Image (tube, coloured by chain):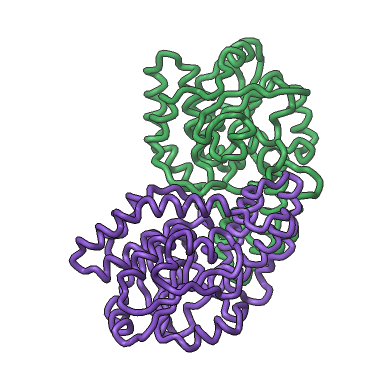
Chain colours: A green, B purple
Amino acid sequence: MKTHLDCYPCFLRQALDATRLAGASERTQETVLGRVLGLLEPTGPSRTPPEIGDRIHRLVRQEVGHKDPYRAAKENSTRRALALYPRLKSLLAKASDPLETAVRLSIAGNIMDFALDRRYDLGQEVERVLNQPFAIDAGVAFREALGRAGQVLFLADNAGETVFDRVLIEFLDVPVVYAVKGGPILNDATWSDARAAGVDGAAVIVSTGSDAPGTILKRCSNEFRRRYEAAELVIAKGQANYETLSDEGPKAFFALQVKCPVIAHDVGVPVGSIVLRQGGAR
Amino acid sequence: MKTHLDCYPCFLRQALDATRLAGASERTQETVLGRVLGLLEPTGPSRTPPEIGDRIHRLVRQEVGHKDPYRAAKENSTRRALALYPRLKSLLAKASDPLETAVRLSIAGNIMDFALDRRYDLGQEVERVLNQPFAIDAGVAFREALGRAGQVLFLADNAGETVFDRVLIEFLDVPVVYAVKGGPILNDATWSDARAAGVDGAAVIVSTGSDAPGTILKRCSNEFRRRYEAAELVIAKGQANYETLSDEGPKAFFALQVKCPVIAHDVGVPVGSIVLRQGGAR
């Protein structure tokens, strides 16, 4: 997905948020903002939003001298989600269509996104996503692909959301490889976030080898790229994975909440939609 | 008031809005955004937000070759406000404290602001502002100043809001000079907007001689500057006049709705507040 002009105000907002979350001085905030302004070129080479986000957050980490401004926020998200875990399991046990419910729960967890400035009640989110119709529902193709696949490559998104993913993974009747970021970026899940969520009991956790948002294949490790190429079925969570992989072929299924107007436009659905969409092209 | 780092995302947003409102192509939007990015320097000389806004909107007009992108929107605002005029007059006729009600009605009109991305119902706004307590109420000092003043200099803000200002002016028992922008900027009122609102029947309309947002005295005409210096009492409407004149002395009274977090912080009140505040320093 190409970067849209409406992403630019949002880039500045995210840079300020991350810099402040790291406790940086007003002077450092000014420096970061000045450098971000210098880095953004709307007429430059076309990049996906996560590629630009990656450069911005790299710059923020450089200026604030803090490798993981979102660490405390991520730990807090995981704690909140774990408190809900028994209820998620019991909702799933009572479900009439448990696969769909497990997918919906995983999508409900996608609300835990610090790239956005939004408040929510996690319990209410679960209710909403369990009852809201899919704006795009590739459920039939997904069930078929799942029936054929010997293994699933599952691309994680945010810390906390990992607990919701765990519920889906525990339900799946096939081995799962759970891919997390190679280093801190925004509130994206890393190895320790996935372990704190208990995913290690249900899946093999691997790193993409990259600390860019989403999954920018050319920035991932050779090992991960080989794994991606060999995968029969990919479950990709969240907006950034959609932004970076939407045109990388039909073996990927994107499970997400559409939270930003630019992505809503690209997907062709309203903001607030829940989506299970199959990848295109390649 | 100094420009805050949080103004920067908003500058980009406003530049895009204005460019699109003028019907510019995607390519022109890119050019404008690129030039705005080049113009913003958070560590540069300290300017008020309207001074930077002025440079941005000047640049937009240059690129889109359109002198007044907000013209149709402004005419529409004036029509909507005029439709409410009889009701405003009848509310005022029934008021127990007519001066306060007239000031509140003028503040209610301050919702008609295209610098912000917000929907509202004009009738409901009037109800809200008539009943909401002032977050800052310089009413006592204002009544005193009004009792002494032989004339009032009234600094207009937006088109449409002009109709609400007219109700206040018609109530005042003292000659009023109503100052509008010297040329189109955002949806700020110009001479023709004030006349379309019927202000010319109640006040002498003059131009500030500047088409910058707010009232940047050094950008105004010599004639207007002399008028400002000689004024005994100034009523200044809206955020941009506050941003540019808040430190220009106690003869100015700022009547506004606080609609942006940066101004809320500077004024020391929550977003959504209504304020009648006396100017400081000088």
Say if B237 sits above or below A110 in the image.
below
Task: Please tell me whether residue B167 is drawn above or below residue B72 in the rendered image.
Answer: below
* Quarter where residue B81 is shown: bottom left
Choose between B13 and A134: the one closer to the eye: B13
Residue name at image x 70 percent, y 18 percent: A232
Residue B135 seen by the camera: no
Residue at screen point 76% across, 43% down: A47
Q: Does B59 sit above or below residue A94?
A: below
Residue B135, by quadrant, is bottom left
B16 to the left or right of B226 = right
Rendering coords of residue B149 (x, y %): 35, 85
Relative depth, front residue between A28 and A42: A42
The spot of residue B36 in percent (x, y) is 70, 60
Q: Would residue B53 appear left or right of B199 to someone viewing this image? A: right
* Residue name at image x 77 percent, y 25 percent: A229
* Residue B108 visible in rendering: yes
Q: Position of residue B224 (x, y in %)?
A: 55, 81
Q: Residue at x 40, y 76 (%)?
A: B176
The spot of residue A59 in percent (x, y) is 70, 58
Judging depth in this view, the residue of A47 and B80 nearest the camera is B80
Question: Relative to the observer, which residue lies in front, A240 or B238?
Answer: B238
Residue A15 horizontal side relative to residue B248, left or right: right
